[in-house]
Image (tube, rainbow, N blue to C red):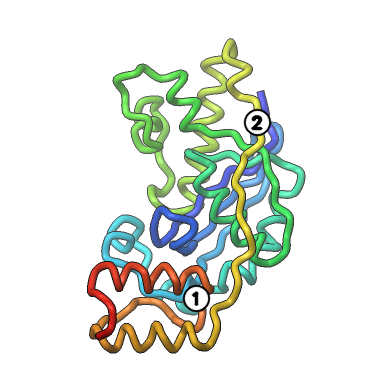
Amino acid sequence: MVQDYVAIDLETTGLDAKRDRIIEVGAIRVRGGAAEETFHSMVNPRRRLNPQIRELTGIRDEMVVQAPEIGDIIAGIVCFCDGLPLLGHHVIFDYSFLKRAAVNRGIAFDKDGIDTLKLCRQLMPAEESKSLEAACAFFGIARAGAHRALGDAGDAHRLYQVLAGRFPEAGEAFVAKPMIYKVKKEQPASKKQKEDLRYLLKYHKIDLPVEIEDLSRNEISRFQDRIISQYGRIR
């Protein structure tokens, strides 16, 4: 049973690491099965939060607008996780966002992972929901703070400890495994790309809830494609 790891969780603007941004990071360094140190930060996504995210997390725009951007703290996160596997509920989701941020800053971040969601799918009854909320309820774990990064990281840690204690015969399932997420460094958008996007938005009278100056080349291309698909080209 792995007993040294970093339990980690992110809150984000959406579910796609290519399109969405981190808004909160919570991590707990665990040694010998006991929480040793925590890392927490709000993160400025350089875009307005949509109502669904505000409702789910309770995070408001004013809570992130003065926070550091992920590029400013990713080195600290990587240092906090140094030498330890990551643990989380569907941990590849969190890893994909962090790996992208690290690559964009030229920082190596290749990690092994322990996924409590996969453990629940293997060890819980098939008819039971395997969400973090449902799994904690099933095993009688009082939640620390649902849909907030540090609270969910703590819940994943406690869930893992309960699973490890109850299912010692499933030792192989608790082995940390390499996480594979391939990503290339994003290139900054050109001046012409930004101008073209602004003109497209003006032409279609669209209020895009992002800071255009902060967008990468690929992000602008994706926004343009979506706008043209929905509203049509400039005539």
Name the residue located 45 percent from the left edge and 81 percent from the top edge: 212
Callout 2: helix, strand or loop? loop
Q: Position of residue 113 (x, y in %)?
A: 62, 37
Q: How many marks?
A: 2
Return the residue found at the far right: 83
Q: Position of residue 131 (x, y in %)?
A: 37, 35
Name the residue located 73 percent from the left edge and 55 percent from the top edge: 108
**Label disc, if present, on residue 1 of the rendered structure:** none
**Label disc, if present, on residue 215 of the rendered structure:** 1
Q: Amino acid at mark 1?
A: Leu
Circles 1, 2 touching at the beta carbon (< 8 Å)? no
Foreground pick, 90 / 216: 216
Callout 1: helix, strand or loop? loop
Residue 114 picture quarter: top right
Name the residue located 40 percent from the left edge and 77 percent from the top edge: 210
In this picture, residue 48 sits left or right of residue 72: left
Mark 2 or mark 1, which is nearer the start of the sequence?
A: 2
From this view, report whether residue 72 is shown above or below residue 87.
Answer: below
Residue at mark 2: 176
Local crowd at mark 1 within 10 Å, few (<14), some, or many (≥20)? Answer: many
Q: Position of residue 53 (x, y in %)?
A: 33, 60
Foreground pick, 30 / 9: 9
Return the residue found at the far front: 235
